[in-house]
Amino acid sequence: MDEPVVVEQEEPADVLACVRAVQAIEAFTPDGVDKILAVVRKVSCNEVADLSTGVSRARISARTGGVKAARAYLNKARLALVAGWKAKSTAVDVEGKKLQDGLAEIRDEVRRPLTEWEDAEEAKAEAIRLEEEAEAQRKADEAEADRLELEALKAKVAAQEEAEARRLEAEAAAKVKAERDRLNAIEKKKEAERQKAAAVLQAKADAKAEIQKAKEAQDAAEEAARLAEGQAKYREKQAEEREERRIEQAEKDRKAAEEAETERTRLAAEQAKKDTAAAVQAERNRIEQERKDEAAKKVKAAADEERQLKCYSDAFGALVKMGIPSDFAGPVLDAVASGKVPWVQFNYTEDVQGGVEQEEDGK
C-alpha cells in the first residue's frame, strides 16, 4: 500500500483535490484528521472577505461548496472503509465524526462573513421601509389638518355673516319703529285705538316673521349639516375604496411574488452553484422595488387628496371674491363635488389650476 500523501501548497486551487491526495485508510486517524482539517482550513480560509463586491461574495460561496464537497467525499470514503474493514469500524466512526464536525465548523466559519453581511443588508432594507412609511403617514396627517382648518374657516365666516345680517335687521326694525312713533305723535293720538290695534297686529306680524326667519335659518342649518354629512360620507367612501383597491393590489402583488418566487426557486435548483449568489441578490432587488412602488403609491394617494382639498379651497375663495355669499358658495361646491349639478364637475389637474390662476391675475 502506498504511503499517505498530504498535499500542502501555499494556495491550493481545489479543496477536494487536496483531500483526495490522502489515503483513506490513513485519513481516519487522529494525525490524519488533524492534517486534513489543517489543509482544508488553509485552502478555504486563505482570503480576506470583501463583501462589497459580488465576486468576493461568490468566491465565499464557492469555497463553502468546496468544503461541502470534501466533507461528502470523506464521508463516502469512511463508509466504504467501514464496509470493507468491519474490525476497525468503531475507531473509524469516532474519527469520522470528529472529521465531520470539524469540516462543518470550517464550513460555517467560511460562510460567517457572508451570513453577517446578508443579515445587515436585510436590517438596512427594513429601516428604509419603516422610514418611508412614517413619511407617508406624516403627509397624510398634514393633509387632514389642512382639511379641518378649512372647515373651521368656513364655519367662522358663516357665523360672522349671520351676525352681520341680524345686526342690519335690528337696525332696520328700529328705524321703522321710530318712524311709526313720529307719525303717531303728529296725529296727536287721534286714532289711539286704531294705532293700538295696528300695533297689536304689527307685533303679531313681527312675531310671525321672526318665527318664519328662525324656521328658515333652522332649515338652512339642517340642509348645511346634511350637505356636510354627505360630503363626509363621500370622502369616507372614497378612502374606503382606495384602501380596498390597495389591499386587493397588495394581495395580487403578494400572489404574483409567491408564484415568481416558486418559479425562481425551481430554476435556481437547476443552475450551477456559481449562479446562486446572483439569483438571491436579484430576488432582494425585486422585493425592494415592490416596497418602493407601494410607498410611492401611498405618497401619490396623499398628494391627490391634498390637491383635491386645495382645489375646493381655491374654488370657494374665488366664488366669495365674485360676491357670492359663503353660505351659498359652500353648498354649491358640495353639490358639484357630489355630481348633483349636470355638465359640471371638478378637474383636479395642475394645468387647469394654472390656467385659472393666470386668468385671475389678468383681471
Image (cartoon, helix red, strand yellow):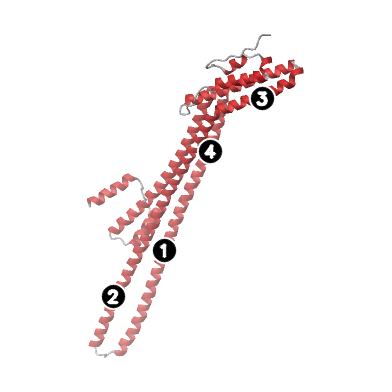
Question: Which amino acid, mark 1?
Answer: Glu
Dot 4: element: helix
The answer to which of 354 and 261 lies nearer the viewer is: 261
Q: How crowded is mark 2: few (under 14 residues within 10 Å), some or many (20 or more)?
A: few
Residue 97 in which image quadrant: top right
Q: Residue 203 carries which label?
A: none
Locate residue 13 relative to residue 202 in the image: left or right.
right
Pick the front one: 190 or 232: 232
Q: Report the disc number at residue 98.
A: 3
Q: Is residue 340 visible?
A: no
* Real-space Cα separation, disc 4 to disc 2, in angstroms: 70 Å
Residue occupying image coordinates x 33% and y 69%: 163
Q: Position of residue 107 (x, y in %)?
A: 59, 26
Residue name at image x 65 percent, y 24 percent: 100
Instruction: Give me the disc on residue 171.
Output: 2
Q: Which amino acid does label 2 sit on?
A: Glu
Could you tell which of marks 1 and 4 lies nearer the N-terminus? 1
In 3D space, how far apart are the residues under numbered discs 3 and 1 (Cα atoms)? 87 Å
Give x and y (percent) for residue 102.
Answer: 63, 25
Residue located beneath label 1 in the image: 223
CA–CA distance between discs 3 and 4?
A: 45 Å
Q: Residue 254 carries which label?
A: 4
Tell me the distance, in whole angstroms, between the alpha carbons under discs 2 and 3.
107 Å
Residue type, mark 4 in image? Arg
- Of the two numbered discs 4 and 2 on the same chain, state the one appearing first in sequence: 2
